[in-house]
Image (cartoon, rainbow, N blue to C red):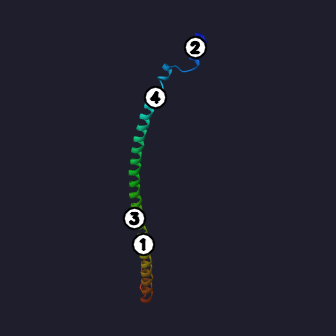
């Protein structure tokens, strides 16, 4: 038979109903999980919005990169054209005996 002393020992080892009142119930956990799911949905929406913005930025950078490349090609062609004119002017000056100041 269990004595009062045995019951007192068991209360020291096992949790009582009063001890368990401080822990979350199944309903509490279900509610918390639902809240977390809502927050995860909001985070996903935010990430989707950021992804769209990043896509637009990538497109703008690609366009700018293309424009820069076009300008580099145009500048190189202009530099070659200018160099050719310089050679032609120097050749004309030599042939006509004109001195070109620096």
Q: Which residue is mark 2?
A: 7
Q: Quadrant of residue 65?
A: bottom left
Nearer the observer: mark 2 or 4; the answer is 2
Circle 2 crowding by C-alpha within 10 Å: few under 14, some 14–19, many from 20: few
**Looking at this rendering, what residue extends furthest in the top direction?**
4
Residue 15 locus on image (x, y percent): 54, 21
Q: Which residue is mark 3?
A: 63
Which residue: 43% across, 76% down? Answer: 77
Task: Report, in whole angstroms, how far the alpha carbon at label 2 lies from the one at label 1.
Answer: 95 Å
Q: Position of residue 37 (x, y in %)?
A: 42, 41
**74 versus 50 height, above or below:** below
Tell me the mark number nearer the camera, choosing from 3 and 2: 2
Label 2: which secondary element: helix
Query: What residue lies at 42% left-to-right and 78% top-to-bottom?
Result: 82
Disc 3 is placed on an element classified as helix
Question: In percent of the image, x 42 and y 83: which residue is there?
Answer: 89
- Neighbor class of circle 1 (other Cα within 10 Å; few <14, some 14-19, many 20+) is few
Give the SS element for disc 1: helix
Q: Earlier in the sequence, mark 2 or mark 4?
A: 2
Identify whether 49 is placed above or below 78. Answer: above
- Frontmost of labels 1 and 3 is 3
State the SS at label 4.
Answer: loop
Measure the alpha-carbon separation of dots 3 and 2. Answer: 80 Å
Q: Which residue position holds label 1? A: 75
Q: Residues within 10 Å of mark 3 (few under 14, many from 20)?
A: few
Q: Which residue is mark 4?
A: 25
Mark before the other along the chain sequence, 3 or 2: 2
The reply to whether dot 2 and dot 1 touch (C-beta < 8 Å) is no
Closest to the camera, between mark 3 and mark 4, is 4
- CB under 8 Å between discs 4 and 1: no
């Amino acid at each position: 038979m269990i004595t009062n002393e045995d019951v007192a020992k068991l209360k020291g080892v096992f949790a009582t109903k009063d001890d368990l009142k401080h822990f979350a119930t199944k309903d509490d956990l279900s509610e918390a999980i639902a809240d977390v799911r809502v927050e995860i949905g909001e985070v996903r929406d935010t990430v989707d919005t950021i992804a769209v913005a990043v896509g637009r930025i990538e497109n703008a950078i690609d366009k700018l990169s293309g424009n820069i490349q076009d300008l580099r090609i145009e500048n190189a062609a202009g530099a070659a054209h200018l160099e050719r004119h310089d050679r032609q002017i120097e050749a004309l000056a030599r042939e006509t005996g004109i001195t070109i100041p620096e």
